[in-house]
Image (tube, rainbow, N blue to C red):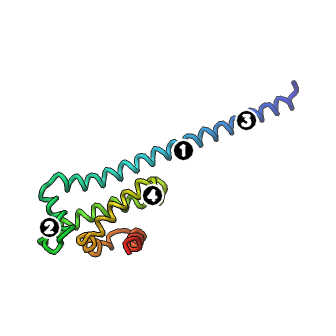
Amino acid sequence: MNWDALGAVGELVGSVGVVVTLAYFAVQTKNSSKAAQSNSTNQSRAAVQDVMGMIASDGEAMAIYYTGMTEPASLDPQQQVRFDLFIFLQLRGTETMFWEHRDKLLSDDLWEAQWRAQQRVLSSRGGQESWLRQQDFVSTKFKDWITTELA
């Protein structure tokens, strides 16, 4: 075998090595993206569940939440602040999921389910009033999106 033939074999082996390395990196990148998506989804769900769990596990919190949703004018000032905080925490969780969905880290199904739940809250009398008081505390794009969806 001459040097030219050896050089050609070396180039071929090197080229195959590059292709194998690129394929490996592509698989690793895909796996990493799936892991990031799963982690993101789990954290977002946990944040929303924490808020709802906090309300559901405390009788006083549940009474404030229910009254705030149905008869917000009957809340005293302290209860109103607490109700607004419940709504704000829900909005923050939903906003995080909104951005994750836009970044393709959250599936359409999960986003739609979360939005339906948030929409029900924001469509209640108390939810509407709380949204009007707090809409400037979320990102402009999220605020504009919600305003359009609720119209």
For marks 2 and 1, give the one nearer the viewer.
Answer: 2
Which residue does the numbered mark 4 point to in the structure image?
101
Q: Amino acid at mark 3?
A: Gly
For marks 3 and 2, give the one nearer the viewer.
Answer: 2
CA–CA distance between discs 2 and 4? Answer: 33 Å
Say whether marks 3 and 1 touch (CB < 8 Å): no
Badge 2 marks a residue whose secondary structure is: helix
CA–CA distance between discs 3 and 2? Answer: 70 Å
Residue 88 image position (x, y, % from top left)? 27, 65
Say whether marks 3 and 2 touch (CB < 8 Å): no
CA–CA distance between discs 4 and 1? Answer: 18 Å
Q: Amino acid at mark 2?
A: Gln
Which residue does the numbered mark 1 point to in the structure image?
30
Q: Earlier in the sequence, mark 4 or mark 1?
A: 1
Of residues 144 and 66, the one drawn nearer to the viewer in this rendering: 66
For marks 3 and 4, give the one nearer the viewer.
Answer: 4
- Which residue lies at the image location 32% right of the left edge and 60% below the top edge? 117
For marks 4 and 1, give the one nearer the viewer.
Answer: 4
Name the outermost residue toward the top.
1
Q: Amino acid at mark 1?
A: Lys
Q: Earlier in the sequence, mark 2 or mark 4?
A: 2
In-image side of 50 versus 144 (left or right)? left
Task: Work out which quarter of the rendered image holds the N terminus and state it.
Answer: top right
In-image side of 59 versus 3 (left or right)? left
In the figure, 54 relative to 122: above or below?
above
